[in-house]
Amino acid sequence: MGTGDIYVGAQFQDSGRPAFRRLADDQLSWLRRVLVAPVGMGKARSLLADTGTVILDGPRGSGRTSAARVLLREYHQDSGFFRELLPDEEDELPLQDPALVENGDQLLLDLSAVGDQQWATARNGLSALRRAVHEQHAHLVVVMPRDGILDPDLQNYRVRLGWPGGEQVLRRHLRVHGLPYEQYLQPDATVAEFLSERRPMREIANFADLVRRAREAARPGEGFTQWCAAARRAWNDRRKDAAELVAGLSEAPQRALLITVAMLHGAHADVIHRAADLLLRTLDSPLVGLPLLQHKDLAARLTEISADTGPDGHVRFTELDWDSAVRAHFWDHMPDLRPHLGTWAARAVELNDPHITPAVRDGLVAHIAGQYLRTGRGDGLASLAESWSSTTASRARLEAAVHALTCGLDDPAHGRAFRERIYQWCAHRRLRGEFAQVLVQICSGVLASSHPDQALLRLYYLARREHPARALQALCELVAGSRRLLDRLARSVLLPPDLHIFLQACDPVPLTDPSGSAHALVEENGVQDSLTTCWRAVLAELPPVTWQPSAERWFHRAGDDTGHRGELLLDLLVGAAERCQDRRGTVFAALYASARKSERTAPGGPARAGETTAMLLQKITAAQGLCPVTVPPVSAGGTRS
């Protein structure tokens, strides 16, 4: 909700809780801390608790979307996902599709900015969506467009939100930013002037962030009045002032240092010095030929560009937000510089220096990305990220590519285009170098935090085409305990790559674990149909040596103390084999042989595993319409007598 930097580090290793769940949790928790409840929030909360659905209306800028996210955060649970539904995007399921909702999901349908036609289309699917939400014990918050028409049968779910107090919103943000309350509770003329007109919540959040940054850059003895005055000056457009400064700097080293400080604002002086020299070399600009001791020192050079080094050794401009104005000036008025800045940034993140931290690297990438996005050049940013990882790239450069794409996905104006571009990369493009690894990370660690269905589809295509092991691992983590992949596979033409994906993803543990829900996934009719369809194709198309390890996991799970859910696993395997038509006898025999083999490694011991095998044989016999078969008992040594 502010202009401050948000750093999302790329992680190319496993770590406990899925990354997409942690990211979503962190973002929603932060939003809950800073939100001042708008008028009507209590009614919306009560309605959502009673019915599972609430439709929010209200003026633009009143915080409707933020309120919607906070309402859903209050119903966070491990059995479902927070997801933003995007019915107007090509690869999204229609609102009427029951597969769109899973048990415990928290669903946001933000239609605040759509046109009349899109709103009319969405309204047609709301009733069906609400029924699915009710059946799955999920929660749905819809943000409707201003002055939108709502059908009579949905009017009971509508709540109109009103404006929260602007001063209260500002103080809440300042408190969360850690400013002393004895400072911001005092009357201030700058604050009063800023809040004299009704402002959208995002603008107030941005101003609060400027006050925070002004406090961090303030001189000793300055207080809240000075912080707010500096924030108000930074609020104004400073690009004309930046142009005057640049015009007075005619030497290449001066301008290189100015650009470097703007792009790496707040970095250590050692980093600034090395990166400025690197920029000159990238641009093939001649270095100063004077003897070393005759060079101007860094302090003098920084003074020329209105910057200095603080007590901590980090370099900042003396005026708040001056770095933003400088970046915009060079980007807008020296367009030939743009491709060189991308090359320089890729080299800069690879500099070997203890002061080049992940936050410094991500800040540089975010500033480059910000200029592409500000000027409507999202395609250029996407191409830059691809080029950074299309060869054998270092870890730092791969993380830079991930962060560049993250900036594109998070941008309100370009997010949809980036999601579509990532889809094209994953589904159709030939990927070079390590770019597939970048796409796996961006799908599993970023896109999945709010759009798990889209992340699933993209990882699915990657698992079929590029680096299947990495993509498949991320895909299985994303869909653990979910029916989404099973449903998508069952609806498709099952080719060998799809069958291998299914065998990796059909872990019987999440299928049979209710995880605090009223029932496990395997007890749902739709899931049973999908599992039967996929297993039938596996048993009919693949050799036993390929599917036996997965079948053995099912037999082991069926032998655990899972009650009727374990028996359901056997029913599904037998039902799938029964549908193999002419090969039924061969498949039944292979299943039985696999069950016998699994007895040797069963966690519960051979005796219990033998009972599972006996139950399987009885079900096979019944499916074939034969007389019941008596299975020899298992001896104490684990062999049949």
Image (cartoon, helix red, strand yellow):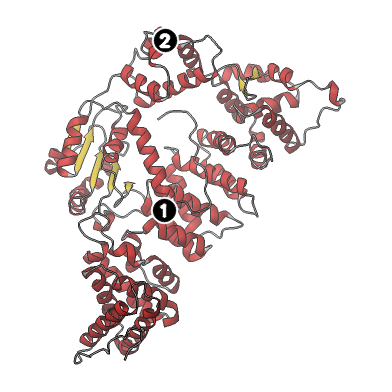
Identify the image quadrant of residue 328.
top right
Q: Position of residue 374 (x, y in %)?
A: 51, 33
Q: Position of residue 566 (x, y in %)?
A: 26, 71
Secondary structure at badge 1 equals helix
What whole-number distance in Å separates the C-alpha atoms at marks 1 and 2? Answer: 45 Å
Q: Which residue is labeled 2 in the image?
A: 190
Secondary structure at badge 2 equals helix
What label sits on residue 36 in the rendered view?
Answer: none
Q: Quadrant of the C terminus?
A: bottom left
> Considering depth in this image, is 179 or 474 the residue closer to the camera?
179
Q: Which residue is labeled 1 in the image?
A: 455
Q: Residue at x 82, y 27 (%)?
A: 288
Question: What amino acid is found at the position of numbered circle 2 in the picture?
Answer: Thr
Identify the image quadrant of residue 638.
bottom left
Q: Position of residue 2 (x, y in %)?
A: 43, 28
Sequence order check, earlier mark of 1 and 2: 2
Q: Is residue 543 visible?
A: no
Q: Quadrant of the N terminus?
A: top left
Q: Position of residue 406 (x, y in %)?
A: 49, 43
Image height check: is 112 above or below 440? above
Image height check: is 614 above or below 312? below
Image height check: is 167 above or below 533? above
Question: What amino acid is found at the position of numbered circle 1 in the picture?
Answer: Ala
Q: Pointer 2: residues within 10 angstroms few (<14), some, or many (20+)?
A: some
